[in-house]
Each structure stands twice: as structure tokens, then as C-alpha cells.
Amino acid sequence: MVGNSITIWWIIPILACLLISAGAFIWLAVRLGGGHSAKNAKNKKNGSFEDAAEKDVEHIFNDDFREELRNRGRLHFEKIIGENAMFLQQDLRLTTSQLNEYMKAEITKKLQEEFTKYEESITDAKQLAIDSIQKTNMAVEEQRQTLSKQLQHETDEQKSRLLKEFENNMADIINHYVLAAIGDQIDLSDQLEYILSDLEENKKAIIEDMQSGV
Amino acid sequence: MESNSREIPAKGLLPTLVVSPADVIDLRRELGGLDEFMRQAALRRSGQALALPKVGHLLGELATVNNLNLLKQTDRKDLIQFLSDLKGSAPVVHMSFAADPSSAFMSKIINWFRNNVHPQVLVQIGLQPSIGAGCMLRTRNKSFDFSLRKRFLDNRQLLLDKLAEDRSK
């Protein structure tokens, strides 16, 4: 709207100049035509003197002279028209260039606004994506921590279970290990004292059981 | 231990070579055969050749320790009676070892039983390789675990303490 009003304000002086030029030309032509007829009427009123003067005038202002004046007026008019056309052309060029500048500025501004909006949209979308990724990351991290805790818990449970099982069956395990490692090197003869001492320790119980059985 | 209401024969010694009820059964069978042979030999005509059966080492030892002459019918009869009584009433214990024990080893075990528990104890020997070392003893009503495994079980807390001590280092 502001651009359009500026263009109109530029065009109005140009049109005014054109109208003034046309009015001046018409006025000159009427004056030239009007003056000639007024003189003739005055000459008629003033009698023969005047007729003589009129003849002289007619002699002076004959057709050639008039033609000369017309030519001059025509040339002047053409000159004025040419100048005005030149002015008009300049103004038009100026207007066009200003219009171009204006259009360029407007388009640039519009494009800038659109780009700004576009950038804002992209920034919003980017932020949205970042937020979404962050939420996903947080969820994944939480999941990972939960799984990690569960895994740790399971591992600890398994460890304690294995440890407990090992402790419960430790005697068997060590016995098996000793047998596997040095089982073939254990001689019964070497164990005689150990066996006899065990028998001695349980002698009373053995005798009691024997006597009760008998 | 085998149950039997019959009394254990008060008289009669068992050599350490006689270990198990199976030995007693073998001796009884061998002595029965010898007695039968001697009975038939008494019925033979004079002048016929007599081929004496070989007496086993165990039977000879048994007769020796009991001061019996196997050529005498009464001694044989007493010994047969003794073995029959022994078979039915001798206290029997079952001992399991990780490996087959030698006769010297078993003679020491038998001596201990016969000196400390009862003079006519018989031992049934079993094999149980899983016990590793030591032995398992089973009497009539009780079972005694003298194995290495039992020793480990008894000292389990000691091992746990040691493990905990190593873990804390």
C-alpha cells in the first residue's frame, strides 16, 4: 500500500507538468489567433486609415509570416512535447527503477520474512526432533539402567546361589578334587593309623552296638 | 551286623587270616569235606592206598591256634560245631574302603576288632571308591563315616573361614 501511494504521488506531478505544457500551448495558439482578429475589427472601425494599416499589417503578417509563425509554434510545441516526453521518459525510467527497487525490496522483505518463518519452522522442527531424541535417549538410558540393575541383581543372586551351592557341597567338591588330583597316590596302608584312631574314638559306640545286637 | 539269637561260642579262637563270613563258610565246607574223607577212610579195607586231601592254610591255622588235631574225629567235630556256631552268631561288621585292602592291613584291623570289641568279630569288606580315603563302618544299628569326605564336612567351617579370609585380602 505504501509503495502504491508513492508511485501515485510520483505520477501526479508528471501528469500536472504535461497538463500545464498542453495548456500553455493552447493559450499561445488562441492568443495568436485572437489578436489577429481583434486587430482586423479595430481597423474596420477606424476607417480607411485603419484599412491601410490593416493592409500593411496584412502585408507584414501575410500568409508566409503566419506560416512562419505556425512553423515556429509547431516547432516550439514539438520541442516542448519532446522535452516533456523526455522528462516523462526520465520520470518513467526513474519510476520504473524505483518501482524495481521497491519491488526488489518488497520481494526481498517477503522472501526474508518467508525465510525467517521457514527458519523458525525448521528450528522448531529441529528442536522438536532434539526433544524427541532426548526423550528417547532418556528412556533408553532409563531402560539401560533398569536392565543393568536387573542384570546386576541377577548376577549377584546367581553368584550368591553358586557360592551357597559351593559352600553346601564344598566337602564333596574338595573330596572329588582330592580324589581326582591325588586319588591314585593315597595308599590304604598309610591310612591305617588314621582309621585305627577313628575306630578307637568310636570304640565305645561300636561295642555298645555289638552288645545290643548280641 | 547279622542278627542271630544263638550264643556266640565262648571257646575257640579265630586266626587273623579268617576275616569274613565267607572265610568261615569256606572253612566249614573244607572241614566238612575233610571229615567226610576221614569217615570214609575209616571204612576202607586195610592195605588200600590212602590219599589224604590237602588241608588249606586257613584251616591249618585255625586248628593250630585252637590246639586241635584234625585227624581226631572229636576235634573235627568240635571245630565243625565251632564254625557252625560262628557262622550263625559271630558279630559281623561291614567296612568299605576306597581300594581293595591288603591282607596285612586287614589283619591289623581284625586284630583291633578282636582285641577291643569281640574276639570273634568278622569283617565284610566292601569297595567304595568315592570315599577317597578312610573307611565307612557299618555295625548292626549304626553307621560310622571315617572317610575323608566326612572329615571335610566336619571341618567345613574352617575351610569357609579360610576362604573368607583369602577373599578379604
Image: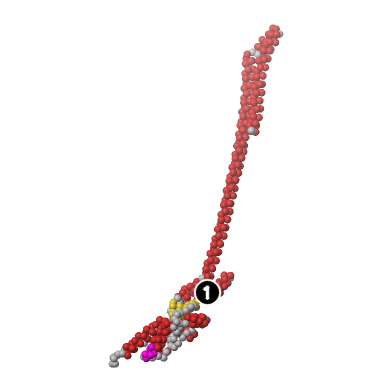
In the rendered image, the vertical position of residue A13 relative to residue B132, given as above or below? above
In the rendered image, the vertical position of residue B118 relative to residue A181, given as above or below? below
> Could you say which quadrant of the image residue A47 lies in?
top right
According to the picture, the residue beneath numbered tag 1 turns out to be B153
The answer to whether residue A84 is left or right of residue B100 is: right
The answer to whether residue A51 is left or right of residue A177 is: right
Q: Position of residue B165 (x, y in %)?
A: 58, 72
In the rendered image, the residue lying farthest to the front is B5
Q: Which residue type does callout 1 highlight?
A: Leu
In the rendered image, the residue lying farthest to the right is A46
In the rendered image, the residue lying farthest to the bottom is B46
Residue under the point 40% across and 86% down:
B81
Residue under the point 56% across and 56% down:
A143
Q: What scheme was used to colour the molecule? A: secondary structure
Magenta stretch: residue B73 in it? yes
Q: Position of residue B22 (x, y in %)?
A: 40, 81
Which of these two is toward me, A210 or A150? A210
Identify the element where label 1 is drawn: helix
Chain hosting mark 1: B
The secondary structure that most of the magenta stretch takes on is: helix
Residue under the point 49% across and 78% down:
B142
Q: Position of residue B107 (x, y in %)?
A: 45, 84
> Could you say which quadrant of the image residue A45 lies in?
top right
Residue B111 seen from this side: no
* Number of marks present in the image shown: 1
In the rendered image, the vertical position of residue A132 relative to residue B26, given as above or below? above
The residue carrying pointer 1 sits among few (fewer than 14), some (14 to 19) or many (20 or more) residues within 10 Å by Cα, namely some
Start-end of magenta stretch: B72-77
Q: Position of residue A159 (x, y in %)?
A: 54, 65
Magenta stretch: residue B21 in it? no
Which of these two is toward me, B164 or B112? B112
> Could you say which quadrant of the image residue B52 lies in?
bottom left
